[in-house]
Amino acid sequence: MANEATPRVNAPYLESFTNQTVRIVGKVTALHGETATLDAAGEVQIILNRESHLTVSNAAEIIGKVQPDLSVKVLQAMDFGSNFGEDNSSLPLFTPIAVSLPFNLPPPYGSLQTFGAPTDSPAARSP
C-alpha cells in the first residue's frame, strides 16, 4: 500500500473506483459494530478493521478498497476529531524559517533567507 496511488474521492465517485484503493474524507455519522457510515458528499458504508477507532460526529479519513457494493473496506483510518476545518485563527498557517544554503544563489534569489511571508511584510497584511 505504501507505493500505491490513492486518489481522494467522495461518495459520488466511488463507482469509478470499484476494486481500487482510495482515500475518502468525511464526517462519521453512525457506528454499527464492524461498520460505520461516513458523510462524504453522500453516505458511504465503511467496513471497519480492528485498528479503526472512529467517533460519531468526528471528521475522518479512510484509506480503503472500494467494494462492488460501493462500501469501502478500511485499510487505514484516521480520526481528525470534532473541530476539523474550524477556523483556528490563533494558530499560524506557517512559521517562517531561516535557512543556510551551502552555495550562493544569483540575485534576486541570493538575498532570500526565509521561506514564507514575515508577519510585518505587505504580503502578510490583510487588504
Image: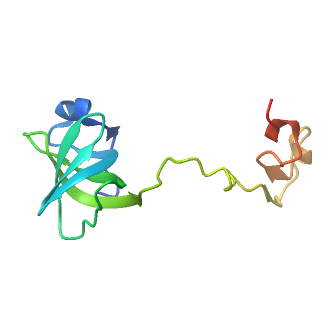
Which residue is at the front of the view, 7 or 101? Answer: 7
Q: Which residue sits at x=28%, y=57%?
A: 56
Q: Which residue sits at x=30%, y=61%?
A: 55
Residue 103 found in image quarter: bottom right
The image shows residue 40, relative to residue 3, as above or below, that is above
Residue 88, position in %: x, y? 61, 52
Which residue is at the front of the view, 74 or 40? Answer: 40
Residue 40, position in %: x, y? 30, 39
Asked if residue 9 lies left or right of residue 86, the reply is: left
The image shows residue 41, relative to residue 19, as above or below, that is above
The image shows residue 76, relative to residue 44, as above or below, that is below
Q: Please say whether residue 5 is visible from this viewpoint.
A: no
Which residue is at the front of the view, 44 or 32? Answer: 32
Residue 106, position in %: x, y? 89, 41
Q: Please say whether residue 69 is visible from this viewpoint.
A: yes
Q: Quadrant of the N terminus?
A: bottom left
Asked if residue 112 lies left or right of residue 27, the reply is: right
Q: Which residue sits at x=17%, y=65%?
A: 49
Q: Which residue sits at x=35%, y=46%?
A: 25
Residue 84, position in %: x, y? 46, 52
Which residue is at the front of the view, 48 or 2? Answer: 48
